[in-house]
Amino acid sequence: MKFVVFNPKLSAKIEPPLLNSHDMSWVPDAGKIGLTTLIIFAIVQVSERNTLLAAALASVPIVSVLAMMWMNHDGQSAEEISGFAKDIAWLLIPSLLMFIVMPLLIERGWEFYPALGAGLLTTILGYFLMIQIMEKHGFVA
C-alpha cells in the first residue's frame, strides 16, 4: 500500500471560469427571436377575434422595421439601411403574388396547403424575375 503525501509544488489552483462578453453574445439574438415570436403570436391571437385587424397588423412591415432597427444597432450605416429599404420596396411587388394567387386557388376549390404552396412558388418565381430586372436596370442597392 502506497501513501500519497501532499506536495504543494504539485497542487494546482482551480478557478471557476468567468463569463465574458463573448459567452453572452447570443443574448441579443435570443431577444430578437423572442420579440419576433411575440409579434407573430399576438397577430394570431388577434386574428381569432378580428381578421381584418389582424390583416392590418400583419401588413405593417414590422419585420422590416425591426430588421432596420437591428441593422442600425449593429452599426450598419444609414446608407446601407437605405439601400435595404429600397430593395424591400422593389420586392414588395412580387410578394403580392402570394396574396393574389392563394385566395384565387382556394376559391376554385384547392385545399389550403396546396394553394399556399402554389402561392409561395409564384412569389419565389416573382422574386427571381424581379431581382433579374433590378440587376439589369441597376436598381440593386
Image: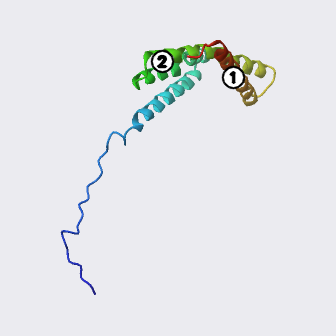
Residue 81 circle label: 2
Q: Which residue is drawn at the image coordinates 69% and 22% (left, top)?
A: 128
User: Left or right: 37 with respect to 113?
Assistant: left
In the rendered image, which quarter is residue 98 located in? top right
x and y percentages locating residue 41 in the rendered image: 53, 28
State whether residue 23 is above or below residue 9. above
Of residues 44 and 101, the one nearer the viewer is 101
Of residues 57 and 11, the one nearer the viewer is 11
Question: In this view, which residue lies farthest toward the bottom?
Answer: 1
Q: Which residue is drawn at the image coordinates 24% and 63% (left, top)?
A: 12
In the rendered image, which quarter is residue 124 located in? top right
User: Left or right: 16 with respect to 119?
Assistant: left
Question: In this view, which residue lies farthest toward the left?
Answer: 8
Q: Helix or strand or loop: what does disc 2 sit on?
A: helix
Of residues 130 and 19, the one nearer the viewer is 130
Query: Spatial distance from mark 2 to mark 1, Cα to Cα?
Result: 22 Å
Q: Which of the marked residues, 2 or 1, is nearer the chain's N terminus?
A: 2
Q: Helix or strand or loop: what does disc 1 sit on?
A: helix
Identify the residue under disc 1.
128
Circle 2: residue type:
Ile
State whether residue 44 is above or below residue 90. below
In the rendered image, which quarter is residue 140 located in? top right
Residue 21 circle label: none
Of residues 128 and 95, the one nearer the viewer is 128
- Classify mark 1: residues with Cα within 10 Å, few (<14), some (14-19) or many (20+): some
**Placement of the C terminus among the 4 image quadrants:** top right
Q: Which residue is drawn at the image coordinates 41% and 26% (left, top)?
A: 74
Circle 1: residue type:
Phe
